[in-house]
């Protein structure tokens, strides 16, 4: 029996978080959701995660984000608005909002398959 790819989803807005969860689960991914990055990276399943999808609004401190991402050490898909400047963050792939579900699903599959 194979284990489903585990994706952490981090988004402060409940409806957006649930829509991401639904889209990923519909494609067969296991999902754990959080409202804040600080909670996600210390969750009991964080080290099992194949990747994390993070809404830019969930990052509480952009200055600390680089160190958080580096300590996490797994691929991160960062969902950003068009006007937000994004610092260079380790292990990070950027997807610009708004987007349809397909680019997100394809990116999760690619990152989980390659492990980076």
Image (cartoon, rainbow, N blue to C red):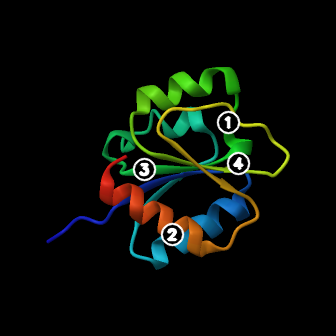
Q: Which mark is residue 51?
A: 3
Of callouts 1 and 3, which one flags the residue occurring earlier in the amino acid sequence?
A: 3
Is residue 23 depicted above or below 42 in this figure?
below
| Rendering coords of residue 90 (x, y %) | 50, 32
Considering only vertical position in the picture, is 50 above or below 113? above
Disc 2, SS: helix
**Residue 59 circle label:** 1
Image location of residue 32, percent across then percent down: 47, 55
The local crowd at label 2, few if under 14, some if 14 to 19, many if 20 or more residues have their Cα within 10 Å, is: some
Foreground mark, 4 or 3?
Answer: 3
In the rendered structure, are the residues bearing label 1 and label 4 in contact, judged by CB atoms less than 8 Å apart?
no
Residue 105: mark:
2
Mark toward the viewer: 2 or 4:
2
Q: CA distance from mark 4 to mark 3?
A: 18 Å
Viewer-proximal residue among 88 and 66: 88
Alpha-carbon span between mark 3 and mark 2: 12 Å
Identify the residue at horizontal 71%, vertical 37% (top origin).
Answer: 86
Residue under the image location 60 percent in, 65 percent down: 20
Q: Which of marks 2 and 3 precedes in the sequence?
A: 3
Question: Which mark, residue 12?
Answer: 4
Q: Are marks 4 and 3 in contact (CB under 8 Å)?
A: no
Please name which of the two marks, 1 or 2, marks the residue nearer to the observer: 2
Q: Position of residue 22 (x, y in %)?
A: 56, 73
Secondary structure type for disc 1: loop
Label 3: how many Cα within 10 Å (few below 14, some 14–19, many 20+) = many
**Residue lying at 31% horizontally and 54% vertically, measured from the top left:** 114
């Amino acid at each position: 029996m194979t284990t489903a790819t585990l994706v952490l989803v981090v988004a402060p807005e409940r409806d957006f978080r649930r829509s991401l969860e639904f889209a990923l689960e519909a494609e067969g991914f296991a999902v754990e959701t959080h409202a804040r990055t600080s909670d996600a990276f210390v969750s009991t399943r964080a080290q099992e995660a194949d990747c994390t999808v993070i809404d830019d609004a969930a990052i509480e401190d952009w200055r600390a984000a680089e160190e958080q991402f580096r300590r996490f050490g797994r691929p991160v898909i960062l969902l950003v608005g068009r006007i937000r400047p994004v610092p260079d963050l380790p292990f990070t792939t950027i997807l610009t909002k708004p987007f349809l579900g397909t680019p997100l699903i394809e990116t999760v599959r690619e990152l989980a398959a390659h492990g980076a």
